Image (tube, rainbow, N blue to C red):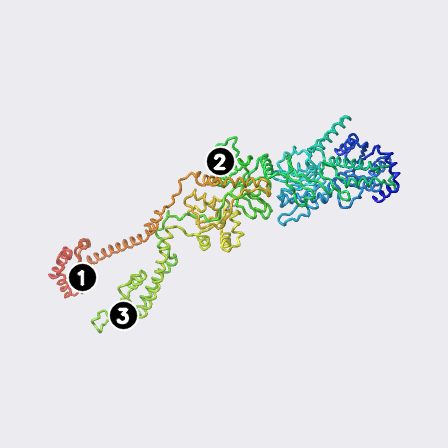
Amino acid sequence: MKFHFFHFCLIFPHFVLSEKRQYSDNKFTIASLFNKENSDAELAFKYAAHWHSLYSGEGTSYNSVVQKVPEGNTFASSKIVCNMTQNNNRLIAIFGPESHKTNAIVQSICKKLEIPHIQTSWQPSTNFPPIISLNFYPAANILAEGFATIVKHMNWKSYAIVYQRDEALIRLQAILKIPESSDNPVTVRQLEESGDYRTMLKLLKFSGITKIILDCDTDDVVDVLQQAQEVGLLNYPTSYLITSLDAHTLDYSSLNTNANITMVRLFNPNNEDLIRHIKSWEVGEMRHNQHVLATPQTVRTDAVLMIDAVNLLIEAVNHLNKTEMISPRSMSCHDSDTWEGGYRIAAYMKEHRLANPISGPIVFDQFGRRTNFNLQLIELNSNLVKATWCPENGTKLNITISAKQRQQMVLRSLQKQRIVVSSKLVDPYLMESNAPRTADSIASRYEGYAVDLIELIARELNFTYVFTITESNGNYDEASGLWNGVVGDVVNGVAQLGICDLTITHQRRQVVDFSNPFMTLGISILYKKPSAGEPNMFAFIDPLAEDVWMYTATAYLGVSIVLYLIARMAPGDWENPHPCDENPEQLENAWNLGNALWLTMGSIMTQGCDILPKGISTRMAVSMWWFFSLLMTSSYTANLAAYLAKERSGVSIKSVDDLIAQNKIKFGTLINGSTYEFFKESDYSKYQAVWNKMSGFKPTTFVGKNNEGVRKVLNKNQDYAFFMESASMEYEISKHCELAEIGDWLDSKGYGIAMPIDAPYRGEINSAILKYQESGTLQTLKKRWWKELIKKDPCELPDDENQTKEDGLKLANVGGVFLVLGIGVTVSFLIAVVEFLWNARNISVEEGVPYLHVLAAELKFAVNLWVTKKAVRGENKDDSPEASENRLDEEKPYQDESLFPLHIMNRLTENRSSSHHS
Ligand code: GLU
């Protein structure tokens, strides 16, 4: 077409000149179609043209015609446009309308008549528009890239896209193309046509989504957010990115939200030209007694684009008019009429750069699509432009605020709200306080390490907070797919911070962010201290198990009886009782049961025996018994030292291996905590063995609370070891001197403060923690809660000297041995007494002397310690009269009272003389 027009100029220069002469100072008409009543864009259109007529000084004036067209009614729209072109012989361009349904028909009429068609609203860029068209609204595909860059830069791991109209999917196409990770899927939801979005928003909330990209009509934004607030999806730090370029013009004060709302705009409301234009609207409308509601802060993008569009059009017309090219005329839609100047104007507009456009740099491609613009990222309640993006930036966002400004922004938003801190009642991190509450002390209801730490951070960052208490640290329920406890509160947006003895774990890290660890620790075993308190005086029994003692005793009896029996059979053990008599009439066997028992006892006591067997079989049996005794006594002796030492130290387990190897001590962990998960998920065979044993105990050895586990360990009637985290263990050990940590840490990890993923204040919290770590404040805090505030006497730690003393066996450890000795000797004494009495009785019966006399004489003799010889009594002698005579002779030497009790002797003499007489 350019070609035709150019030819036309060359061939008919006179015609062109005469046209100029005729119309150069004429008025031009520009028309705009609007779907809505009284929009800012309408004012912008009217007054921009008017302003130029008054002030451009180019001798041209512009008449603006405004027409309302029903949205979606293409027939009515086409009729209006055709009337316009037919009745208006100075029409140079048609603007609008906004709706792209009616826009299409206007565009095609303009194309046919070759009248420039100018748009200021978003249009899908699926088809190439006719080159007579220009759209000042950013090209859909490039704008989509801009949004995608912003989303990528926000680094949101998991988010939802909530859109209203189907066309939004074109606007968001580049965002939808961002690859999503399998564990962080992107949710896409459409707003219900009914206008009630609560159910959908509630579902988003329950699925743990806290980042939302919202694409809806500007006028519906507040309504959607209002409903989000109703379902609890507008709390800090839920984040929204609103794609409407007019979101910044809305009034969010009714929401009173502390959510993080990011908006994108195309222009700076403080632009001086814009302010001047709005003033001109006010002045202009005042003449018609109308009041302008628009302010630079509320004016919409289409109005700003309208100003730029009219400005550029008028600059083009003014310029072209000088070269006599502008000659609009009335045209009918039904004729094959076209206007040559239209393309010229459109081409000029595409090439020409407007000086200081309000909506940023304006560049068009050959199809009239705007390819350059400047997106400004702002946040609700902040005038600072955080970042900008223009198509030249590609995938980079231009951060416009310094780190300090960013930090200040974060702090300001943190300070604006009362931060909810989720925690769990667990000593000494968070405990109910007994101290009287003061009105100005937020944390006065609770006390503990976590309270102090949060207070320190809050003071540093100058925010206020309130605690919310939950039951557990937080674990994932596979059945419901939900997190509970402190982690759950943070995931669900109930709390902005989570603090307790909360271990940083990989699984939790998937759903929340953690601060730097404020405490490092590892899993260890809590068990009773080596108890010097209860020594076992029968510890000498321990080296052999009960059943071994029983078997040994049975073997002793059995072997003694067998020895007795074989000795009776073994010819070698039948001996000549009088070795001088070479041909004895009788043989004697020394192996009665008593001797057999004596020999076996002597052997096992490693003492030997005064008589030994002579027969082959008996020797064989005895040597086997000796072999048995040798091994048993050596094993016993070897074990004895170790068992006595163990008895003294009281430690029966020293490591996890010891725990696995034994069956006496049960062990467990806090259920569903990180320690529980550590064993459950471990790939290491040793910890798998712990898990297998631990999970198999019936009744269960897992506990619901740490202090329940500690109670179980302390229980004297129970043998229980508790796998616990060293930091909490340290506290319990300071409280209970009878507890001790056994072995080394099984792992190494830390406690951190949980916060929502990508929480903007994470850096601030981290730097506060670092600061307190470096200054030693955290150490002081720990000392305070772990040692100083424990109201009890410090545990006595054995000093070196004590330890040396402890090396010796105490009476309590070997008391049993003394006891056995005492009992043995006592029993032998009692036997001696019984023997003594029995002997006296025998004498009394044999000799016919009263029992008490015999007893007294025997007793007197027994205590007469210097008498070492005793007369042989009659009972062992021959009873014949000769023998009796002999015996009397033999007894003579004992007639000495010192050798035999005198009265017994007298009595004996009496008896003898009476028997002689008789
Ligand atoms: N600190 C653990 C957690 O965060 C709780 C205690 C434990 O498991 O030993 O789950």
Q: CA distance from mark 3 to mark 2?
A: 91 Å
Is disc 3 in contact with disc 1, using a CB cutoff of under 8 Å? no
Q: CA distance from mark 2 to mark 1?
A: 93 Å
Q: Nearer the viewer, residue 800 or 292?
A: 292
Label located before the other in sequence (3 or 1): 3
- Of the numbered discs in the image, which one, if any, rests on residue 874? 1
Is disc 2 in contact with disc 1, using a CB cutoff of under 8 Å? no
Asked where in the image residue 757 lies, by quadrant, the reply is: top right
In this rendering, position of residue 552 left or right of residue 778: left
User: Residue tagged by mark 3?
Assistant: 574
Residue type at mark 3 is Trp
The N terminus: image quadrant: top right
> Marks 3 and 2: which is nearer the front?
2
Q: CA distance from mark 3 to mark 1?
A: 29 Å
Rendering coords of residue 586 (x, y %): 24, 71
**Label 2 SS:** loop
User: Residue tagged by mark 2?
Assistant: 433
In this rendering, position of residue 839 left or right of residue 677: left
> Marks 3 and 1: which is nearer the front?
3
Q: Residue furthest bottom?
A: 583
Q: Residue furthest left?
A: 917
Rendering coords of residue 223 (x, y %): 68, 36
Residue type at mark 2 is Ser
In this rendering, position of residue 312 left or right of residue 331: left
